[in-house]
């Protein structure tokens, strides 16, 4: 049986990137990992993930959660560096 950690490892994203997808799409982490795996191989998938993380940053800032927004900025930077 695969664990959530196994699924995240197989989807080519970090746990924080999967969490950002889950947050944006209001999905359980395991389903977000599956969506992330799909998007990593879709022609416009990287752009869609970047947009999701940017939306999460904007939402965090709108809610006044600067700490969460800061963490998401780091997630976005890492994603951009590793998924071009």
Image (cartoon, grey):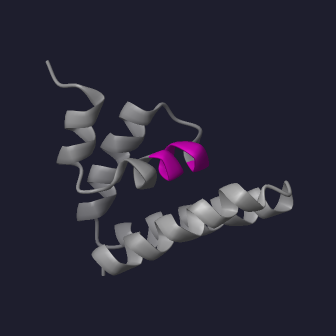
Residue 21 visible somewhere in the drawing: yes
Residue at 43%, 35% in the rendered image: 29
Towards the viewer: 51 or 74:
74
Which x, y percent locates residue 49? 45, 64
The extreme left residue here reads: 1
Q: Quadrant of residue 58?
A: bottom right
Residue at 43%, 55% in the rendered image: 17
Which x, y percent locates residue 73? 58, 70
Height in image: 23 above or below 75? above
Instruction: State the quadrant of the C terminus.
Output: bottom left
Q: Is residue 20 left or right of residue 82?
A: right
Height in image: 35 above or below 65? above
Residue 3 included in the magenta stretch of the image: no
Residue 83 visible somewhere in the drawing: no
Specify start and end residues of the magenta stretch as a single range: 19-24
The extreme top residue here reads: 1
Residue at 79%, 63% in the rendered image: 61
Instruction: State the quadrant of the N terminus.
Output: top left
Height in image: 84 above or below 58? below
């Amino acid at each position: 049986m695969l664990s959530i950690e196994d699924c995240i490892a197989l989807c080519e994203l970090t746990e924080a990137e999967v969490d950002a997808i889950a947050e944006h799409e209001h999905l359980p982490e395991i389903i977000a990992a599956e969506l992330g795996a799909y998007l990593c191989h879709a022609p416009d998938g990287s752009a869609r993930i970047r947009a999701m993380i940017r939306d999460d940053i904007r939402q965090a800032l709108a809610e006044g959660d600067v700490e969460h927004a800061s963490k998401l900025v780091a997630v976005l930077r890492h994603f951009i560096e590793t998924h071009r």
